[in-house]
Image (cartoon, grey):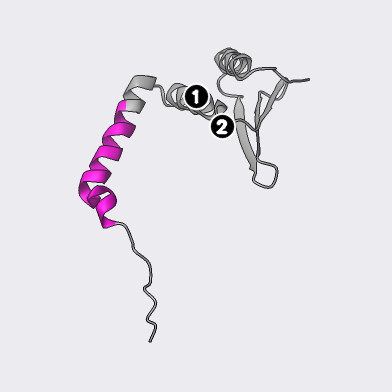
Amino acid sequence: MATRPETIDDFTDKVKQLYESDPEKVRLVLKYRHTDGVMTLRATNDELWLIYKTDQSSDMRRLEAMQLWMTASMCGSSVESLTEAAEDDVDTTVTQTGGLTNRRRGKKSKRK
C-alpha cells in the first residue's frame, strides 16, 4: 500500500517510524529528474510504501537531516558524532588543499 504524505515533516516522521518498526527491511530510494527538476523519495519495508515528490530546494536540508539520521541509525552511532566527523573531514580537506586558493584555472587561449 502506497501513501503520499503531504509535507516533508510528515514524510520524515513516517520514515522514522517505519525504520524503528523493522530496521532490517527498510530501504530508502532517492531519485532526481533533472529535466523536470523533481526529486522523488521512496521508503519501503515491502509492505508499506511512502512516496514524496518535491521540486522545492527548501526541502533539501530536511531531507539531508533525515538521511543523516538514517545513516547514524544504521551505523549504530549518534547523529551528533557523524556531523562532527563530517565537519572535521571538511576542515582537514580545506587546510590540506589550501581552500579555494588552489582552484584550477583552466586552459588559457593563446591568440596572436
Camera-nearest residue between 85 and 44: 85
Could you say which quadrant of the image residue 5 lies in? top right
**Residue numbers of the magenta segment:** 84-102
Residue type pointed to by label 2: Ser
- Going 38% across and 87% down the picture, which residue do you hit? 112
- Going 36% across and 73% down the picture, which residue do you hit? 108
Callout 2–callout 1 Cβ contact below 8 Å? no
Q: Position of residue 21 (x, y in %)?
A: 59, 13
Q: Where is residue 86 in the image (x, y as percent from the top left)?
A: 33, 33
From the viewer's perspective, tell me whether residue 43 is left or right of residue 66: right
* Disc 1 packing (10 Å; few <14; some 14–19; many ≥20): some
Could you say which quadrant of the image residue 49 lies in? top right
Q: Identify residue for label 1.
A: 70
Please say whether residue 92 is one of the residues in the magenta stretch.
yes
Q: Gap between marks 2 and 1, in whole Å?
A: 21 Å
Is residue 77 in view? no
- Going 46% across and 27% down the picture, which residue do you hit? 71
Q: Where is residue 46 in the image (x, y as percent from the top left)?
A: 71, 25
- Going 38% across and 72% down the picture, which residue do you hit? 107
Q: Identify residue for label 2.
A: 57
Camera-nearest residue between 11 and 76: 11
Q: Which residue is farthest right? A: 1
Q: Considering only vertical position in the picture, is 34 above or below 70?
A: below
From the viewer's perspective, tell me whether residue 14 is left or right of residue 86: right
Precedes in sequence: disc 2 or disc 1: 2
Q: Where is residue 16 in the image (x, y as percent from the top left)?
A: 56, 16
